[in-house]
């Protein structure tokens, strides 16, 4: 992630110090949703840098009802915010409500918050519509001097939004997801690398790629990350990457060279 400009880092750091006691007090008093919306709106303006009057609105209609807040930057809808009371723990039904709002609006990003916890979701408008949790920020545990804390707020800030840092962060999270990692481990290239390493451990072992893949799938990788829509998408993503790599001039040259070497000096395969 790009380095946070010092001016913005200072604002985020000061915002953490200022709003942690405010939010803690609101949770202790179990303030209602309307008061929580006020805290969230102030946090968006004072800490995250949005203009309270031109970029934050509570009048965004969605199929006859209104979401709690909508964030518009340069006149374009960026993300929706569903706010629950400060003392309320966020639950699955609250997530569904927030996601349904975003789905009905055709908005890719939605945040569910009780002012303390900020859950950032990204929608995928496939059939059916799916959502994934990109990040969950707990303001109470943020540290005003730690880069990890400031980075989490930076991706939601106005400046970070305009530089697409939330998009970049989401891509990184997807890349490191258990589904993508499982698909990468099962790829021909990785399976081949594991086989070669096993042969170095025991040169006499008659182990081929199929044996390695079978062992990975039966006892190493959990079945839950090898099945379902998310697993299939990850496999396709890894497959596309492999095909693109094979089509590159460097890869073709390597393949041609290997084929020539195999023709001139055949190698016995275990």
Image (cartoon, rainbow, N blue to C red):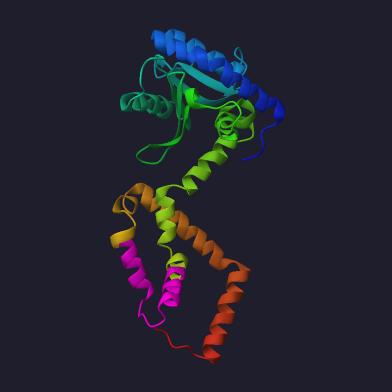
Residue in the picture at 49% in, 26% down: 141
Q: Position of residue 262 (x, y in %)?
A: 52, 86
Side (left or right) of 63 relative to 154: left
Q: Nearer the viewer, residue 263 or 48?
A: 48
Residue plotted at (62% across, 69% down): 249
Nearer to us in this view, 105 or 123? 123
The answer to which of 114 and 171 lies nearer the viewer is: 114
Q: Quadrant of the C terminus?
A: bottom left
Q: Is residue 215 above or below residue 3?
A: below
Residue at left offset 34%, top offset 72%: 210
Q: Is residue 89 visible?
A: yes
| Horizontal and vertical percent position of residue 253 | 61, 75
The location of residue 128, given as percent across then percent down, is 34, 39
Q: Which quadrant: the N terminus?
A: top right
Q: Is residue 267 magenta?
A: no
Of 145 and 148, the residue lying toward us: 145
The residue under the point 40% across, 11% down is 28
Relative to 173, is 73 on the left or the right?
Answer: right
Residue 32 seen: no
| Total marks in image | 0
Query: Magenta span: helix, strand or loop, mainly?
Result: helix
Which portion, as a residue range, is magenta? 193-217
Report x, y in % for residue 123.
Answer: 43, 35
User: 251 above or below 81?
Assistant: below
Q: Is residue 201 magenta?
A: yes
């Amino acid at each position: 992630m790009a380095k946070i400009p010092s001016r913005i880092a200072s604002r985020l750091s000061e915002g953490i110090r200022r709003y942690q006691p405010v939010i803690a007090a609101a949770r202790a008093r179990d303030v209602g949703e309307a008061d929580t919306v006020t805290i969230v709106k102030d946090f968006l303006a004072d800490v995250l840098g949005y203009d309270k009057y031109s970029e934050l609105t509570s009048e965004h209609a969605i199929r006859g009802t209104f979401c709690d807040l909508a964030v518009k930057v340069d006149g374009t809808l960026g993300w929706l915010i569903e706010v629950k009371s400060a003392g309320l723990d966020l639950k699955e039904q609250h997530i569904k409500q927030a996601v349904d709002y975003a789905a009905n609006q055709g908005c890719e990003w939605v945040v569910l918050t009780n002012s303390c916890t900020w859950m950032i979701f990204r929608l995928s408008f496939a059939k059916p519509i799916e959502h994934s949790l990109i990040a969950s920020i707990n303001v109470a545990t943020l540290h005003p001097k730690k880069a990890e804390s400031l980075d989490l707020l930076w991706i939601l800030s106005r400046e970070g939004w305009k530089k697409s840092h939330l998009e970049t962060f989401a891509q990184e999270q997807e890349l490191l997801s258990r589904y993508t990692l499982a698909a990468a481990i099962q790829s021909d290239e990785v399976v081949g690398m594991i086989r070669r390493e096993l042969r170095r451990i025991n040169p006499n072992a008659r182990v081929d790629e199929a044996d390695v893949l079978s062992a990975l799938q039966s006892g190493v990788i959990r079945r839950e990350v090898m099945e379902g829509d998310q697993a299939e998408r990850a496999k396709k993503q890894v497959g596309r990457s492999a095909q693109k790599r094979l089509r590159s001039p460097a890869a073709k040259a390597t393949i041609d060279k290997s084929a020539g070497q195999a023709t001139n000096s055949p190698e016995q395969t275990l």
